[in-house]
Amino acid sequence: MLTIWFDSHRRVQGLRNASSGPQLEGFAQELYRMGYARITARRHIRAAEHLAYWSSRQGFGEGPVNEQVIQRFGRHLKRCRCQGYGHTDRAELLRGARLFSAFLRAGDASGTRFAEPQMPDSPLIAAFVQWMRQHRGTGDSTLDNYKRPIRDLLARIGEDPGRLDVEGLRRFVLEKSHDCGWAATKTCTTALRMFLRFLIAEGRCAAELDAAVPTVAHWRLSALPRYLSCEEVDRVIASCDPTSAVGRRDRAILLLLARLGLRAGDIVQLRLEDIDWKGAWLSVTGKSRRKARLPLTQEVGQAVVDYLQGGRPRTDSDALFVRARAPFRAFANHCAVSVIVERALHRSGVKCPSRGAAHVLRHSAATSMLRHGASLQDIAAVLRHRSIDTTQIYAKVDVTTLGQIAQPWPGAQPC
């Protein structure tokens, strides 16, 4: 497999004759299976060769290449004087080294598949994640959101929960509220309460310390939903290039968001088997793992077909939408979908009225349905709201109907 990436016979023989030759051969085969571009694969193989050479000189070439070894390798790169290894981008070298490390840990170096490695959680966060899954059934996407503020908190106090106190918790939340909006602050306080309840259950902090986390002030239905007009939505969708693979993928995603009102997280969770082509249905797993079926319109269905036939790369992943660059796997989280929408907004020259670009298209879909005569009950069914109360916020944008029922202000002169 090394001959796929390198034209020089001498270079290939040099890699194969090295002590790590079999592992490098298998790593090259795995990079080919994952669909890496030629220049990127060569860089990763170069990083793997460098890691193997350095680790053998350090005396632990036969041991496991774990994260501690990778971190030591990263420190070595700052002052590397290894003969025959040039000074390239350090971050790129570490990325290739981590991929090679994950490949070696997979077991069979002759072709075992591996996932792109991620930074491991601390023991305390890992225990919290396990506790939340076991006792509350929390999903991975929610736990990923919870981890961010908890990591920031532990960066201050270390791994000793005994250092947590009321004053420190409130100061931490106050500082967070200055740096982000209401929704992110609300996620932060919820994550902290869950984390503190875990610590209390494990007997690692003072009881009732979770009550010290302040509540974020917010008045329900106090704001208007931010949305785009139908013309602006059409401009955003039309900004995608239908002749390119990325354009076909992005157009299908935008149509699912703008026509069916899907959330960004719904896009990430979609699988190939979720589409019933004969019945023209789309199965969606939303919040709290609730499943729902939505009608697949001709416009949306044709866009998905165009992507599957002329845009989706060959991959073993069963995710409906995958990355356009190797490794071809599902999106890591909902943020990737928001980036796709933000780029489309920029291309079309449409200004996003609020943060959360993907959710703006969901609001736009609901507003469009309302203005075309759909009832709140119908909108709630499409948006998969548990309660009609959640959908009532869209009644505030129906200015025409509100004008028919509005009463004159007492004492005011009629216009």
Image (cartoon, grey):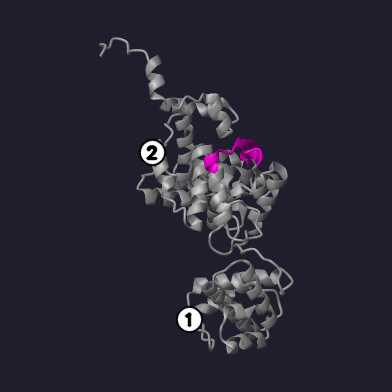
Quadrant housing the N terminus: bottom right
Quadrant housing the C terminus: top left
Q: Where residue 131 appears, x then y in whole percent?
A: 70, 48
Q: Where residue 241 appears, x then y in whole percent?
A: 44, 54
Q: How many labels, in total?
A: 2
- For the residue carrying disc 2, how many other residues have a C-alpha within 10 Å: few (<14), some (14-19), or many (20+)? few
- Rendered image quadrant of residue 312: bottom right
Q: Which of 263 and 221 is in front in this view?
A: 263
- Rendered image quadrant of residue 96: bottom right
Residue for badge 1: 87
Which sits earlier in the primary sequence, circle 2 or circle 1? 1
- Which residue is painted at 65% across and 70% down in the image? 30
* 65 part of magenta stretch: no
- Which residue is painted at 55% across and 45% down in the image? 302
Q: Is mark 2 on a helix, strand or loop?
A: helix
* 279 part of magenta stretch: yes
Compared to residue 380, the image places residue 322 above or below, namely: below
Of discs 2 and 1, which sits in the foreground? 2
- For the residue carrying disc 1, how many other residues have a C-alpha within 10 Å: few (<14), some (14-19), or many (20+)? few
The amino acid on which the numbered mark 1 sits, given as a three-letter code, is His
Q: What element carries label 1?
A: loop
Q: What stretch is highlighted in magenta?
A: 278-300
Q: Nearer the viewer, residue 409 or 81?
A: 409
Residue for badge 2: 231
Q: Where residue 216 appears, x then y in whole percent?
A: 49, 37
